[in-house]
Amino acid sequence: MTYKSSIKNKLTNIIIIVSTISSFIGYGSFVYWYMQNQHEKTIEQSKTVAIILSQDIAKLTFLNEVSAAADITSNLKSFKNINRLVIYNLNKKAVYQYSKNNKSFPIKNIKALSDPIIENNILKTYLKAKYQNNHLGYVYIEFQIDSMLNVIKENIFMLFFILLSMFIISFILASIYAKKFTYPILNLVTYLAQIDTLKNIPSLDINVNNEYGKLYDEINTMLKRIDESNEQLKIASVAFQTQNGMIITNKYQEILQVNDSFTRITGYTKEDVIGKKPSVLSSKLQSDEFYKKMYESLNKKDFWHGEILNKNKKGEVITESLTIHVIRDEYYQVLYYVASFSDITQEKLTQKKLAEKENILIQQSKMAAMGEMLANIAHQWRQPLSVISTISTSLLHQKEMDIEINKEYEIKSLNKINKNTQYLSDTINDFKNFFNPNKDKNDFFIKEVCAKALLLSNADFKKLNIKVIENIQNAKIYGLENELIQVIMNILSNAKDALVDSNPKEKLVFINSIVDDNNQIIITIYDNAGGIEENIIDKIFEPYFTTKHKAQGTGIGLYMSNEIISKHMDGSITVSNKEFDFYNTHYKGALFEIIIPIK
Ligand SMILES: Nc1ncnc2c1ncn2[C@@H]1O[C@H](COP(=O)(O)OP(=O)(O)OP(=O)(O)O)[C@@H](O)[C@H]1O
Ligand SMILES: [Mg+2]
């Protein structure tokens, strides 16, 4: 792998630069040291020169031996770096002068012995000339010393060699170290690059006890965590792909994610809706009030559940059972809305069809009761009709015979006819009302309901000599009057059938009603027909359960009654067997209890 600014190259460069700079500094220090050393050495040399020359200086100054000067000159010639030399006697008078190029030069007087000075790469020094501890005079020496440039020039090859070897050594070192440092990183990079393609990521080997080992360790931990959260993500994504349509929006209600079921139910693809608001699904059939309540619930409870009418991509209305949850952060700010819904359009349709079917059933059972009731009505009509017939016949007779009719008698007779006609009209009205499919709820009295139910069943009861004992606490109920009449008639009809079957000596039916503390009306109807066998008592509310002959019963009566009371009147109907005493006789019979809340 190659990189534009690879760490390895950088490291090599840094090492080379550092070693080059340090070799320069090293060389510079060496030159500085050399220069310093050269001065000290020269000063030392000047002392040595003074000592070497001391005997000749003594000869020259004390003994005035001229030959001594020639000796001094020949001695000095061997010192290549001495440019000039002057010898003074004790009176500070110059007695000898030497110049490397044999040229004379102006001689300075000695003022005082001072430290050596360097001017233009020439070291100038004054020394005391001594011989066997006797002060002879003074010596002034000028030494030629090397300039820094000269030193460098002289050593240029050496310098070049040092730099080259430094460069080579540092390059090799840099390469080795760079490799050592970058190898674990490159190793790591290669490893990390593979992670995408590897299914089961093997852990990195941690056998290095340094920062890299720590790094590997951290990366292993990190990868383990990523692995774990990947696992959780997998679970979450599986959970997300349920049969329910799912929508996740941000706090602005812009759709972030939907699942496949969403597409299946609504027909919209992910691309259709991402970034849009869920209102793209709106059917506009829901009121503002509906949405207001939804948001109230979301704000207060972080939750809403209900049914909603939406539109699919084709524009068809679908009924959804929808649940929305609000996800908040630790500061209670909304992060996401998560909505889950199922398509209950079919269910609703089936429900509607069932309700329609049920209505038909109710109507059918009413029709079935009609025959029975017609007999009742015919029976009820027999008496008043015969009264009317008798009176009118008598009146007609008297008119035909020209018999003077007492006016008072005539009015009384006509009133009687009127009263009976009214009775006929009332019964036919009741009958008509009962078959009215009108399902509006209204206020009615329980006493009236019982009376009407009894009236409509009365003929049979009278014929079969069944005694009805009523004990009604009157109360106003809001609900479906005809339906309740039907329920009571069903129970009375069953009691009648059971009484005919068991045929006790005295046939009794009791109807009681009472309003309890919870403001509900409790209607109890029981007979003395012996009760219902325990093994079937739990089944009698099931549809089509009957113990009767085909011609006599279909098994719909109690099922219908239960549906009416529980679904249309929010009440309940239950059955039990009851044992009781009536006029010193012990009886047993079935007891039906209807409980309806009074609104
Ligand atoms: N008062 C009662 N005494 C004894 N058995 C009863 C009584 N009331 C109902 N049953 C039993 O409950 C069964 C179911 O009653 P249900 O009214 O539902 O149907 P059915 O009377 O048999 O037929 P349908 O009412 O449809 O003409 C009856 O067949 C009968 O066995
Ligand atoms: Mg019945």
Image (spheres, rainbow, N blue to C red):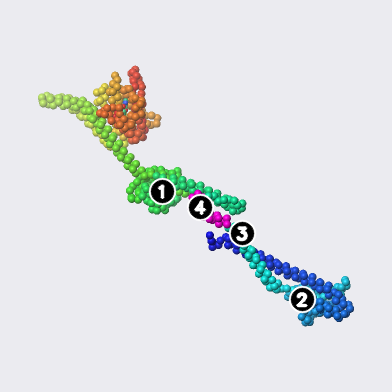
- Residue type, label 1: Asn
Q: Label 3 to label 1, Cα distance in Å?
A: 54 Å
Q: Secondary structure at mark 3?
A: helix
The residue under the point 24% across, 31% down is 370
Q: Label 1 to label 2, Cα distance in Å?
A: 102 Å
Q: Which residue is mark 1?
A: 259
**Quarter of the image that includes the C terminus:** top left
Ligand 1: does it lie within 8 Å of the C-beta at label 4? no
Q: Which residue is mark 3?
A: 177
Residue 21 visible from this viewpoint: no
* Horizontal and vertical percent position of residue 463: 24, 23
Residue 187 drawn in magenta = yes
* Horizontal and vertical percent position of residue 57: 85, 76
* Magenta region: 183-201
Q: Which residue is mark 4?
A: 195
- Earlier residue among tags 3 and 1: 3
Q: Quadrant of ligand 1?
A: top left
Magenta stretch prevailing secondary structure:
helix
- Earlier residue among tags 3 and 4: 3
Question: Residue pushed farthest bottom?
Answer: 103
- Residue type, label 4: Ile
The residue under the point 26% across, 23% down is 464
- Earlier residue among tags 4 and 1: 4
Q: Which residue is mark 2?
A: 80
The residue under the point 22% across, 28% down is 375
